[in-house]
Every structure is written in C-alpha cells, then in structure tokens.
Amino acid sequence: MSLAFVNALECKEPHSDEIWAVAWTANNTAVSASADGTVKQWDSTSGQVSMSRPPHNLAIVSLSVSPDGKFALYNGLDGTTWLWDLQADTVVGRHESYDRSTVQGAEPSWSVSLNPNGTTYAGTSSSGNVNIYSANPDSFGTRQAVLTSGRSRHGMDCVHSPDGTRVALSNEAGQVFIFDLESQALTSTYSSHAMCVRSLAWSSDGQLLLTASDDKRLILHDVRSTPSGKPGSGAVATLTGHSSWVLSTSISPDGRLAASGSADKTIKVWDLSARAAVSTLQESGEVWSVAWSPKPPAPGTAGAFITGGQDGHVRWWRSAGTGV
C-alpha cells in the first residue's frame, strides 16, 4: 500500500533559523519553536502568524502543548522554561532551572513535557534524571520530584503518556526509560537502539511507544502496563529506510500511522500494522520535528501533519486519499 500526501500550506513568515519543535493544537493552530529564539503560533488555514513571543537570546529547544490547546510549555538552550497562555497571549510561568542559588542540585532542563492533567511538567537533564516541576502559575518551576534512571547520560527527550500517569525518557546512549509518576518508580528500561534516541511518541491509548534514533531506525515498543504491574513485551517492530539520523517522530491519533523526520531531508509515513513505509516526502533540509493533527482523520483519508526543520518553514501536509 502507498499513501499520497500533499504540501497543502506553508507558513508566510518563516523563522530566521532552524525549527526544532512543532505542535498541532486542538484549536487547529500550529506552534513552532526555533533556534532563532522565538516561539510562534500559526493559523492552520492561512499560514499566518497569529501570536509570537519576543525572542529569547538563545535557541528554543523543546516544546509541549496541552491537550486542550490552551497552553504551550517551552524551554531554552540555557534551561529557562516558560508557560505561555495561548488564549490570553501571556506568559504565566517562567523558571530558570539552572539557578542553583535557590535549589540545591538544580539541573538545567533540556527537553520538557507538560503533563496532560496540567498540574506538573517534566524536564530532562544531563545527569540522566527526570525532574518533575509544578506547572501551577503560582508555584511554577517548584521541583516536586526527581526520577532517577541510574544512567548518567544526557536526557534527549521526555514525553508524558496520554493519560498522564507515566513519563518516558530517552538518552544520548540509546536507552529508553519509563517511569510511573504515582509511585515515582522506574518500571521499564529498553536498550533497543545503538545510538542516541532523539524523539519519542506515544500512541493515543498509551500501549505503544515509538522511538527515533541516530542509528537510522525507529523502533516500536509494547509498553502496556498490566494490573499486575508487569510491563509490556518491549520492542516489537523495527522501521528502517532512512539513510541518516531520525530526528523526530509522531503517531497519528487513530494509531494507524506514524510520521518521521530525518537528517536525510525526507519525511516518511509508516503503516504501523504493516511495519512499512507507505509514503516518502522530500524536504529542502533536515526535518527536526513532525506532529500529527490531533483531530482524527476523516473517513477515506489518512489525516494531516505538520513539519519544521532546517529552513525555518512550518509546512502542513494533508492526505490526498487512502491510496492503493
């Protein structure tokens, strides 16, 4: 089977540097974070900027949007984290995670993830820990817990499960860890990759986790948690076809497809049940971020996603049909 996707829209005022993260919100807007220090929200009908934040003096390296599309959490290269109210266009939280003058053992965050319940957020660090912070505007950035992987390697990505009960961490050595947030316990460790894992994506039911690595592969993991506490079976499929680092990945809301962006300047769409690529799209540069629309695809279509990368443009891609 093959699927056709078309470049339906391109942003009108591109970033002046690489885009390192994109998100498609429940309100049908796109949010992008760039190495130029800015974060922008885009209208997905016109491609115009609807809101933007004043530029930070360093790159914005991580972005996480609440399921209702009301808040965007983003993090700078120096470890400054902001919570942006997308309805009021105001920053309601700011935290300097690198500041050791107030918190002993403070660690600069790299990747950040807003818990879907909105009360906390997670941040990775160079020590291999995941720090859990308050996302409440009144106490934003107050550290509430430290989850320890036991590996002192830089944390590349962290993403909460859709139900907010778990958080996944990947590191520069190719390992992936899953923590239970209620017990603060490390429940699963996977060493499926030979090199750095840069991106993680959960399926909407929380049963699968897709990992993207510098080893040019994506690996699908069964991460189901059972009532007995026994973890899922781990790696169940390997997706190969990229010729360079896989920089980003995202799973469609219906769980049928995944998209991946690579340093080989392509986007691939994968059929997860067939374990095969069903579409390859050429880009002008490295594709640092992909994100599916959270809206389930219409009957007879394969949905839509956005991408951002080396040339600073946000692009909207839409299914041209079911394909044959």
Image (cartoon, rainbow, N blue to C red):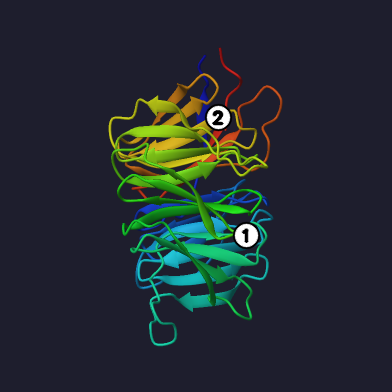
The label on residue 90 is none
Q: Tell me the residue at 35%/32% (across/down).
A: 217
* Outermost residue, bottom side: 101
Q: Secondary structure at mark 1?
A: loop
In the rendered image, which quarter is residue 190 located in? top left
* Mark 2 or mark 1, earlier in chain: 1
Alpha-carbon neighbours of circle 1 within 10 Å: few (<14), some, or many (≥20)?
few
Residue denoted by label 1: 182
- Cβ atoms under marks 2 and 1 closer than 8 Å: no
Residue denoted by label 2: 257
Q: Is residue 253 above or below residue 83?
A: above
Q: Is residue 215 above or below residue 50?
A: above
Q: Nearer the viewer, residue 43 or 125?
A: 125
In the rendered image, which quarter is residue 77 located in? bottom left
Q: Amino acid at mark 1?
A: Glu
Q: In which quadrant of the rendered image does the C terminus lie? A: top right
Q: Amino acid at mark 2?
A: Leu
Q: Secondary structure at mark 2?
A: strand
Q: Tell me the residue at 38%/72% (across/down).
A: 107
